[in-house]
Image (cartoon, rainbow, N blue to C red):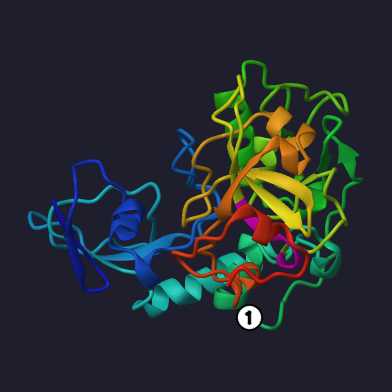
């Protein structure tokens, strides 16, 4: 099937969504996505940030779709024509979505551990406005521990449901989910600290905001002060391939490896994530390539550079 997005035409397989077709083309025409996650079945359709305008339905039915559609849930038709960044309707609607997401989200970026790698920060910078029309009181929640290594800031949550899908699909005993309905809905457990399984830490990696944070890394450093290094180890629970975030000779945190759309390539176990914080536990392979456009990657890492582990481990050495 042929689909044209912002003037770029590509052939795709039947059943491909507009969002994935745009990702095959790449570049600035790819719609943002706060809830869709290609590794998680049935994700998407929650945040509405990926709205696009279909100006031509197909060759058989060239009529435009009357409303903007979620690109993560809409499959392409042969001959379909789509506008994303070239549509004023889309850009205006996306501003409204950002304003809606920020209604209850606190502006606590200076103290949030997600600052510097937060999708909502990037989205607000690119599509938001400097002012808000919201005058009501924001909803607030107490911070709670869900498991001994994960802190939940429900106040920051945008209800993307990624963590729920992750726990449901990669663990055998999901014990958290969505409680209540409507504007009272929240992510949580019936009993605090109830989450205890070998892959629960992956909920931190899939969260696009600072709602789920690593208690072993909280307030230790800003992400742009540490160096993400590809590392591996022999593990009997997971693939053992991760990114270790180093400051000098210390490993401050461990995360799963991610692709250019910041989606996890392979989920890792809690042993690798929380318990292996010594350099001797890992085989340091070299700097991880950071493709995100936020401050974490600014002027720090370049593609194709190979650095030996001893040089990287020296405090203050710049890998580029």
Residue 298 percent location from the top left of the image: 60, 75
Query: Going by the image, does 319 lie left or right of 215?
Result: left
> Which of the pair 62/52 is nearer the observer?
52
For label 1, the SS is: loop
Q: Is residue 303 above or below residue 313?
A: below
Q: Quadrant of residue 318?
A: bottom right
Q: Which residue is mark 1?
A: 129
Q: Is residue 281 visible?
A: yes
284 with respect to 56 (left or right): right
Q: Where, quadrant-wise, is the C terminus in this rendering?
A: bottom right
Residue 245 in picture, x, y percent from top left = 70, 53
Above or below: residue 9 compared with residue 273: below
Left or right, residue 232 beside residue 174: left
Percent position of residue 279, x then y = 74, 43
Using the image as rendered, state which of residue 150 and residue 153 is in the foreground: 150
Q: Residue at x 69, y 55 (%)?
A: 209
Report the span colored magenta: 224-229
Task: Answer with the quarter of the image where residue 143 lies.
Answer: top right
* Number of other residues with Cα within 10 Å of mark 1, as a class: few under 14, some 14 to 19, many 20 or more: few
Residue extending furthest toward the left: 60
């Amino acid at each position: 099937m042929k689909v044209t997005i912002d003037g770029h035409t590509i052939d795709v397989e039947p059943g491909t969504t507009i969002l994935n077709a745009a990702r095959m083309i790449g570049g600035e025409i790819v719609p943002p996505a706060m809830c869709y996650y290609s590794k998680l079945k049935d994700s998407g359709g929650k945040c509405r940030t990926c709205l696009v305008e279909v100006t031509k339905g197909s060759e058989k039915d060239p009529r435009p779709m009357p409303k903007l559609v979620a690109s993560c849930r809409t499959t392409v038709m042969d001959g379909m024509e789509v506008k994303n960044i070239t549509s004023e309707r889309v850009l205006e609607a996306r501003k409204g979505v950002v304003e809606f997401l920020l209604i209850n989200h606190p502006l606590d970026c200076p103290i949030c551990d997600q600052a510097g790698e937060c999708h909502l920060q990037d989205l607000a910078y690119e599509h938001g406005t400097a002012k808000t029309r919201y005058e009501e009181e924001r909803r607030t929640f107490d911070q709670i521990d869900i498991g001994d290594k994960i802190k939940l800031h429900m106040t920051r949550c945008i209800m993307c449901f990624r963590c729920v899908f992750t726990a449901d699909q990669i663990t055998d005993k999901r014990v958290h989910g969505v409680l209540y309905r409507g504007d009272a809905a929240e992510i949580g457990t019936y009993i605090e600290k109830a989450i205890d399984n070998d892959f629960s830490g992956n909920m931190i990696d899939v969260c696009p905001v600072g709602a789920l944070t690593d208690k072993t890394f909280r307030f230790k450093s800003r992400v742009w002060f540490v160096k993400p290094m590809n590392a591996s180890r022999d593990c009997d629970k997971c693939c053992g391939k991760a990114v270790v975030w180093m400051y000098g000779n210390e490993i401050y945190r461990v995360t799963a490896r991610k692709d250019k759309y910041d989606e996890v390539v392979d989920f890792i176990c809690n042993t690798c994530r929380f318990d292996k914080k010594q350099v001797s536990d890992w085989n340091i392979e070299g700097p991880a390539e950071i493709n995100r456009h936020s401050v974490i990657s600014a002027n720090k890492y370049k593609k194709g550079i190979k650095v030996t582990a001893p040089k990287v481990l020296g405090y203050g050495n710049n890998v580029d």
